[in-house]
Image: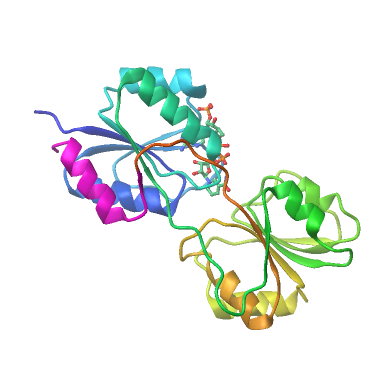
Amino acid sequence: MPPSRVLILGGTADAREIAEALAAAGHATISSLAGVTTQPLRPAGALRVGGFGGSNGLARYLAAEHINLVIDGTHPFAAQISRQAMEACVCCDVPLFRFERAPWATQEGDTWIPVPSVGAAAEVLPAGARVLLTIGRRDMAVFFGRPDISGIARMIEPPPASPPPHWRVVCERPPFSEASEVALLDEGAITHVVSKNAGGSSTEAKLTAARKRGIPVVMIARPEKPAVPVFTSRDALLAAVGRVLSP
Ligand code: NAP
C-alpha cells in the first residue's frame, strides 16, 4: 500500500516539528506555506508554497493530490486558512486535525491589558508611549499612523512600506532570550509591549522581560477558529494520526 498522504498547513515551528515526526513515521507529508516569508525554514517531506484559492481551491487540491488527512498547524492568528481548511475537508470528507499551542496566561508580576483586536491594541496605547510592537509585519498602519506613539517594531522580514521616522524596525527570527529582550526594552526606553497571544516558548521571553521591568503588555486575544479536533500536545496529535492512518 502506498504511504498515507498528509497535508500540513504550516508557517509555524510547530508545523515543521509535526512534519518531521510524521515523515520519520513513514507518512508522505506535504507541508503548505502561504508564501509570505521569502526565506522560510524548510520542513521535512514535500513542500508547496502559495495560497490554494479559497476553500474551493483547497478542496480541488485535496482531491487532486489524494490527501488522506489534513493537519492545520497554522499560527493561532491565521483564522482564514483554518476556516477554509474546515470547509474544504467537510466538502471532500477528509479528516482534519488542528494543532494549537496553549495560549500564554498571566503570572504573578504581570500587568496585561487584554484587547480583542489589533485595532483595539493601537487605540489603548496612551499618548507618548514607547512601544515594542511584536505582531509581525502586517497591520502596522494603525500604529504607524499615530503620531503620538513611537518605538520598535520587530518582525522576521522588513515591512512592505518604510516605517515613519519615529519608529525603528528590527528584523530578527525567534527564538529570543530573556537577556536580549530585557536589553531591547532598555535600549528602546520601552513603556509598553504589544503582543498577540500566540503562546509557545520561542517568543515568550518578551513577557518575562516585561515582567522583570514592570512594563505593561497589551495582549491581543486569539480569533475564533472552527470547531474541529484540536490537540495542544504534539504526542497526542501524532497518536491520533496513528489511529486514523497507517503509514
Ligand atoms: P490567513 O489570514 O488565515 O490566510 C490568508 C490566506 O493566505 C488564505 O486565505 C490562504 O490563501 C493563504 N494561506 C494561509 N496559510 C496558508 C498555508 N499554510 N498554505 C497555503 N496558503 C495559506 O493567514 P495569515 O494570518 O495571513 O498567515 C499566513 C501564514 O503565516 C500562515 O500559514 C500562518 O501559519 C503564518 N503565520 C501567521 C502569523 C499571524 O500572526 N497571522 C504569524 C506567524 C506565522 P488562499 O485563500 O488563496 O488559499
Q: Please tell me whether residue 234 belongs to the stretch shown in magenta.
A: yes
Q: Is residue 36 left or right of residue 91?
A: right
Find the magenta span and give its range: 230-247
- Above or below residue 68? Residue 16 is below
Which image quarter: residue 197?
bottom right
Query: Is 89 left, or right, of 156 in this rendering?
Result: left
Q: Based on the displayed image, in which of its 4 quarters is residue 95 positioned?
A: top left
Q: Please say if 187 is above or below 20.
A: below
Q: Colour scheme in the image?
A: rainbow
Residue located 16% across and 43% down the image: 26
Rendered image quadrant of residue 217: bottom right
Quarter that holds the C terminus? top left
Q: Residue at x 78, y 46 (%)?
A: 141
Q: Is residue 159 visible?
A: yes
| Residue nearer the viewer, 191 or 64 | 191
Place of residue 78 in the rendered image (x, y in percent of width and height, measured from the top left): 54, 41
Relative to 8, does residue 21 appear above or below in the rendering? Answer: below
Q: Nearer the viewer, residue 35 or 76?
A: 76
- Does the magenta segment cover residue 172? no
Main SS category, magenta section: helix
Residue 26 shown left or right of residue 211 in the figure: left
Query: Residue 154 in the image: x percent, y percent?
Result: 66, 60
- Residue 151 relative to residue 194: left or right: right
- Residue 87 versus residue 28 in the image, above or below: above
- Is residue 23 at all visible to an observer of this figure? no
Name the residue rendered at 53%, 56% in the picture. 198
Q: Residue at x 42, y 54 (%)?
A: 13
How many tags in the picture? 0
Name the one closer to the observer, 93 or 41: 93
Residue 144 in picture, x, y percent from top left: 82, 52
